[in-house]
């Protein structure tokens, strides 16, 4: 059906000019999971940033802090694999968080070529405050879903991811 809609929309030789007040047709986009995931991601990202306020943490930075908090001493390469990002991205994020006094790097006890990461005392406090805000953010994001729908959404997103 999606293929038929796509081919049908490509066969129209000339679209009528639309008035600026008319609702915009999303055409084939309405049937694309990726389109809706991206729109949802943008809305979630914007709400997250607004909810962080003066803490000034991005979703990615919060994810890094959460992984380090849950796994003190983890290496940058393990962190990168867990987050699905390359080494240079991890180094850049850790540099920023270290510069803000939130993360500490120390030589790894078993691998002299890598660093062991942990949250500083300030990082622990910032993470605790951010976590409270993240839980409020999660409630706002899912406010139109009941508990079963929220769980189903998480299940489906885990399968897609």
Image (tube, grey):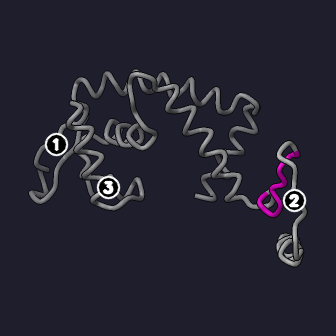
Q: How many marks are shown on the rendered structure? A: 3
Counting from the top left corner in percent of width and height, residue 161 is at 57, 58
Q: What segment carries the magenta color?
A: 22-29
Left/right of residue 151 with respect to residue 117 in the rendered view = right
**In magenta stretch: residue 7:** no
Q: How far apart are labels 1 and 2 at the CA level?
A: 59 Å
Q: Residue at x 36, y 43 (%)?
A: 64
N-terminal of the two: label 1 or label 3? Answer: 3
Quarter occupied by residue 125? top left
Q: Would you say the magenta stretch is mainly helix, strand or loop?
A: loop
**In magenta stretch: residue 24:** yes
Q: Quadrant of the N terminus?
A: bottom right
Q: Secondary structure at mark 3?
A: helix
Neighbor class of circle 1 (other Cα within 10 Å; few <14, some 14-19, many 20+) is some
Q: How far apart are labels 2 and 3 at the CA level?
A: 45 Å
| Discs 1/3, front | 3
Q: Which residue is mark 1?
A: 105
Q: Secondary structure at mark 1?
A: strand
Left/right of residue 71 with respect to residue 95 in the rendered view = right
Q: Residue at x 20, y 36 (%)?
A: 99
Q: Which residue is mark 3?
A: 89
N-terminal of the two: label 2 or label 3? Answer: 2
Q: How far apart are labels 1 and 3 at the CA level?
A: 16 Å
Tell me the number on the disc at residue 17.
Answer: 2
| Discs 2/3, front | 2
């Amino acid at each position: 059906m999606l293929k038929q809609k796509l081919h049908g929309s490509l066969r129209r030789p000339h679209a009528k000019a639309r008035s600026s007040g008319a609702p915009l047709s999303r055409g084939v986009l309405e049937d694309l999971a990726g389109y809706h995931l991206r729109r949802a991601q943008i809305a979630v990202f914007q709400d997250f940033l607004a909810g962080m306020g003066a803490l000034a943490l991005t979703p990615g930075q919060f994810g890094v802090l959460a992984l380090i908090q849950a796994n003190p001493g983890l290496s940058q390469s393990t962190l990168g694999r867990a987050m699905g990002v390359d080494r240079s991205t991890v180094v850049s994020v850790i540099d920023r968080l270290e510069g803000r006094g939130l993360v500490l790097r120390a030589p790894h006890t078993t691998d002299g070529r890598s660093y062991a990461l942990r949250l500083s005392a300030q990082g622990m406090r910032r993470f605790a405050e951010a976590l409270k805000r993240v839980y409020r953010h999660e409630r706002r994001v899912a406010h139109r879903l009941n508990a079963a729908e929220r769980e189903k959404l998480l299940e489906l997103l885990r399968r897609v991811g």
